[in-house]
Image: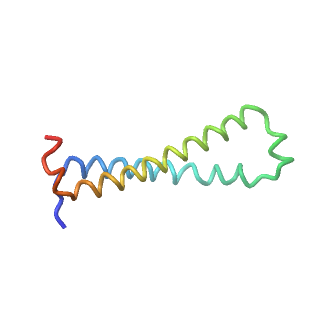
Amino acid sequence: MEIKNQTLFFVGIIVLILGMLIIIFDYPQLQLLESMDSESYYMLDQQKKDIHQRMKIEISIGIGLFVTGIGLLAVSFLKIFENRLR
């Protein structure tokens, strides 16, 4: 398998790694907050509930970046995009 567009390949690697790091570091914290029973969750102050909502958005962005990175890696192997960015 030959890489047709090296620039797109390296951008894909960077985006993929960024998405993976977001997922790896935020997922355990999100699971901790979501595994609380409803009484404990309602006892949290508003700031911690806001943090929980932002973490949901952040993990969604991380998943999006991860999928985008995979897509860019796949596209970098296609001949159609061989010298498109140069």
Relative image position of residue 37 (x, y in whole percent):
82, 53
Q: Is residue 4 left or right of residue 48?
A: left
Relative image position of residue 45 (x, y in whole percent):
79, 34
Which residue occupies 51% across, 52% down? Answer: 23
Residue sitting nearer the eye, 9 or 24: 9
- The residue lying furthest to the top in this view is 47
Relative image position of residue 19 (x, y in whole percent):
44, 49
- The residue lying furthest to the bottom in this view is 1
- The residue lying furthest to the right in this view is 39
Which residue occupies 80% across, 45% down? Answer: 41
Q: Is residue 12 left or right of residue 83?
A: right
Which residue occupies 46% across, 50% down? Answer: 21
How many callouts does the rendering have? 0
Q: Vertical placement of 24 versus 51: above or below? A: below
Q: Vertical placement of 52 versus 28: above or below? A: above
Q: Quadrant of the C terminus?
A: top left
Relative image position of residue 12 (x, y in whole percent):
31, 50
Q: Residue 70: which quarter of the image?
A: bottom left
Q: How is the image coloured?
A: rainbow
Q: Quadrant of the N terminus?
A: bottom left
Q: Is residue 62 left or right of residue 16?
A: right
Q: Is residue 4 left or right of residue 65?
A: left
